[in-house]
Image (cartoon, rainbow, N blue to C red):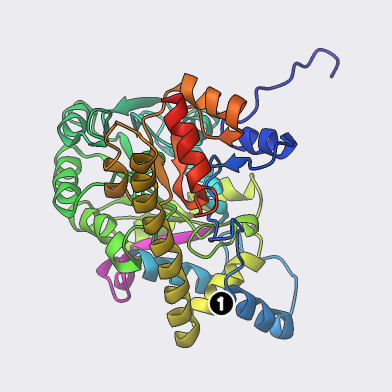
Amino acid sequence: MFDAIQPAPPDAILGLTEAFNKDDRPGKVNLGVGVYKDASGKTPVLATVKEAERRLVETEPTKSYKPIDGDPAYGACVQSMLFGAGHAVIADKRAATSHTPGGTGALRVAGDYLHANHPGATLWLSDETWPNHPSVFEAAEVPMKRYGYFDKATGGLNFDAMLEDLSKASSGDVVLLHGCCHNPTGVDLSAEQWAKAGDLFAQKGLLPLVDFAYQGFAQGIEEDAQGLRALAAKVPELIVCGSFSKNFGLYNERVGSLTFVAGSADTAKAVQSQVKARIRRNYSNPPAHGGAIVSTILNDDALTAQWHGELAEMRDRINGMRSLFVQTLADKGATQDFSFITRQRGMFSYSGLNKDQVGQLRDKHAVYIVGSGRINVAGLTEMNMDYLCEAIVEVL
């Protein structure tokens, strides 16, 4: 049966890392996969994570299964981060949260839920989005359309195109939005634009699905949640897919969350029962360790404060690399204006490099960038900056 099987094409992002690992050229640079790296080029384990793990090793009483939707304590931590402690959504028990295997797991369960319970809904994706978004929802058999978002001429947001396209959506359609640090463009909505989008969704009966994978990487935990909270004030129903991979550095623990906000507590319970049915036939129940780390940190005031400090250090380093990147490109002779990179936020930047230039960087200089030109700014360091910018200027 297997003899006729042909190799699948490599993943657009993770496949790059495989190729990078096989490259034996010295000085090679990997700016593909979205993983934070410190000034030495390493992906660190946060001190707060190590402390939480120490406590768990000493106190964990069992390795028994978790509930289908995970520990209630974990769900409470997720909701507090998303909406703020005491928010009406939480107080009225209109939110139900599941612990999922990463943000990708949350997206897939959301897709399965939509396919089973809202088969007439079309999912709208921004014209530039995380390459795995369409793959996940295609696998879940959810029909998709695109809305305008990124303005290639300015490196910024084309908000008018976004509103125009979404004005054509039908009642009951779902709109996928990036909560902050839009992947791959690094371009986010302003507070006023979030509110205007919420007005449109309420008017047309559209359901927002917010992919919130980078909370804290733009401006801060509270600041980055303002868009989501603006939507919660405008529409009665939301879906939020979250991830703690980046802001806690828990990449290989696969710690995600899926939160549904409904119009009432009873409706939230009914929706959650459908979500749990999808989970049960997929992976049954979530892994425990990563969620326990998050809950341990967020339920301890001292550890929470320390984690906020560690998160700020990561955020500040990324922003510093953005500025240094733009300045070094200019110093090396780039004639193009790359200042838009300093206005983008989060781990990624749409550099403007085309597919041919990206290929030259890989083949001639061992610099690995996604074919779209997306650069993982968190992979830049003072050590590789000169080499990288010289290579980019050459291919330009």
Q: 10 Å neighbourhood of mark 1: few (<14), some, or many (≥20)?
A: many
Which amino acid, by three-letter code, is at mark 1? Thr
In the depicted view, which residue is nearer to us: 264 or 6? 6
Residue 257, compared with residue 339, is above or below; it is below
User: Is residue 136 among what the camera can see?
Assistant: yes
Residue 130, compared with residue 60, is above or below; it is above
Image position, residue 211 (x, y; %): 40, 48
Q: Could you tell me which quadrant the C terminus lies in? A: top left
Residue visible at 46% across and 28% down in the picture = 394
Question: In the image, is 205 to the left or to the right of 373?
Answer: left
In the depicted view, which residue is nearer to us: 194 or 322? 322
Residue visible at 20% across and 25% down in the picture = 168
Question: In the image, is 284 to the left or to the right of 116?
Answer: right
Q: Which residue is mark 1?
A: 48
Quarter holding residue 87: bottom left
Is 97 in the magenta? yes
Residue 140, compared with residue 49, is above or below; it is above
Is 212 in the magenta? no
For the record, the magenta segment spans 83-99
